[in-house]
Image (tube, rainbow, N blue to C red):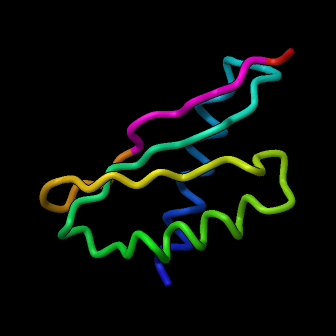
Amino acid sequence: MHEMGIANSILDAVRKEMAPYPGARPVKVTVRIGTMAGVDPDSLTFCFQALVSGTEFEPMELAVETAPADELELGSLELEEPS
């Protein structure tokens, strides 16, 4: 199931993007997946939630947007500032 590897890569990207924002909490990450990318969005969401469960990233949401061709990219990351 390569969706688990993709989900892991998404979390790695989130960690990297969060580095300049200590104390911030990730709320939502959006990815764009092309219809020809060979990725099942439901499986990706399941794998992502399994990886996030019980971590400091819970309850971060994964939003999947449909894109053309074989595109697969991190679209946006929504953070909550520390209180």
**Within the magenta stretch, is there residue 78?**
yes
Span shown in magenta: 74-81
Apparent side of residue 58 relative to residue 28 in the rendered image (left or right): right
Q: Residue at x 66, y 28 (%)?
A: 18
* Between 75 and 63, the one nearer to me in the picture: 63
Apparent side of residue 54 relative to residue 66 in the rendered image (left or right): right
**Within the magenta stretch, is there residue 82?**
no
Magenta region's main secondary structure? strand
Report x, y in % for residue 82. 82, 18
Report x, y in % for residue 63. 47, 51
Can you tell which quarter of the image residue 33 is in?
A: bottom left
Can you tell which quarter of the image residue 76 is in?
A: top left
Q: Residue furthest left?
A: 69
> Looking at the rendering, in which quadrant would you find the C terminus?
top right
Q: Residue at x 60, y 72 (%)?
A: 47
Report x, y in % for residue 37. 25, 68
Does residue 64 sit above or below 47 in this rendering?
above
**Image label count:** 0
Does residue 64 sit above or below 41 in this rendering?
above
Does residue 19 sit above or below 7 in this rendering?
above
Report x, y in % for residue 35. 20, 67
Apparent side of residue 32 relative to residue 12 in the rendered image (left or right): left
* Between 64 and 15, the one nearer to me in the picture: 64
Q: Residue at x 68, y 47 (%)?
A: 60
Does residue 81 sit above or below 78 in this rendering?
above
